[in-house]
Amino acid sequence: MGWLIVGVIFWLTGCGGGTPPPPPIKEVPPKVAVKKEGGTKPADRKEPPKKEEPEYQYHPIGKPDPFKPFIELTPVRERVRPVPLTPLQKYDISQLKLVAIISAPEGNIALVEDATGKGYFVRKGTEIGKNEGKVTKILKDRLIIEELFEDVLGKVKKSEIQMMLHQTEEGGES
């Protein structure tokens, strides 16, 4: 009996309940212009003024260049001196190879070779590399070069690079 009552309640709420359908849309007839004395011309009608938005223009004054990288390590030489470069200053240090070191009473001399096999003698104080490098020490097994860089804040920083002497083993090349 209880199930019968529950079924009747669901049947009653499901049949007549719910939301009523929306009212039909009424068509509004277009407004017809009424002639007044003197007539109305299209030019006499006042329409609200159109707001024209100004065309956007970019003014770069005081703004950073969007095509320049944010962080640059700029070699100091580009800003300091516009003098002709020696052949050793045209190469990056990674393109050079330390071939030999000669011990002399006046100071050690090193032989550096470029990628084409051409050799150059360097002493302490010789300028080398693209980034204002200078030979600071020539030891028995390595060459120490000091390069100058300008960091992001504009401060000049020193970087020390070591070129190791490539040693061959007895009985053949390695």
Image (spheres, helix red, strand yellow):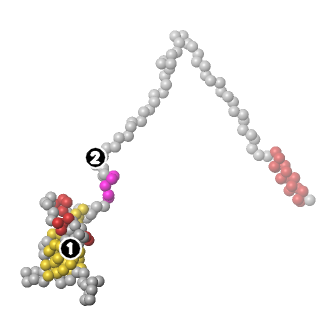
Which residue is rendered at x = 49% and y = 25% of the image?
47
| Segment tinted magenta in the rendering | 66-70
Mark 1 and mark 2: Cα distance apart in space:
48 Å
In the image, taking residue 3 as reference, residue 136 lies left or right, namely: left
Residue 132, image quadrant: bottom left
Whether 110 is among the magenta residues is no
Q: Secondary structure at mark 2?
A: loop
Q: Where is residue 122? Give x, y as percent.
A: 14, 74
Q: Where is residue 67? Give x, y as percent.
A: 33, 53
Q: Which residue is mark 2?
A: 61
Few, some or many residues within 10 Å of mark 2 (<14, 14–19, 20+): few
For this orientation, the residue located farthest to the front is 171
For this orientation, the residue located farthest to the bottom is 170
Q: Main secondary structure of the magenta part?
A: loop
Quadrant that contains the C terminus: bottom left
Which residue is rendered at x = 7% and y = 81% of the image?
106
- Amino acid type at circle 2 is Ile
Does residue 19 appear in the picture of this structure? yes
Residue 164, image quadrant: bottom left
Mark sitting on residue 113: 1
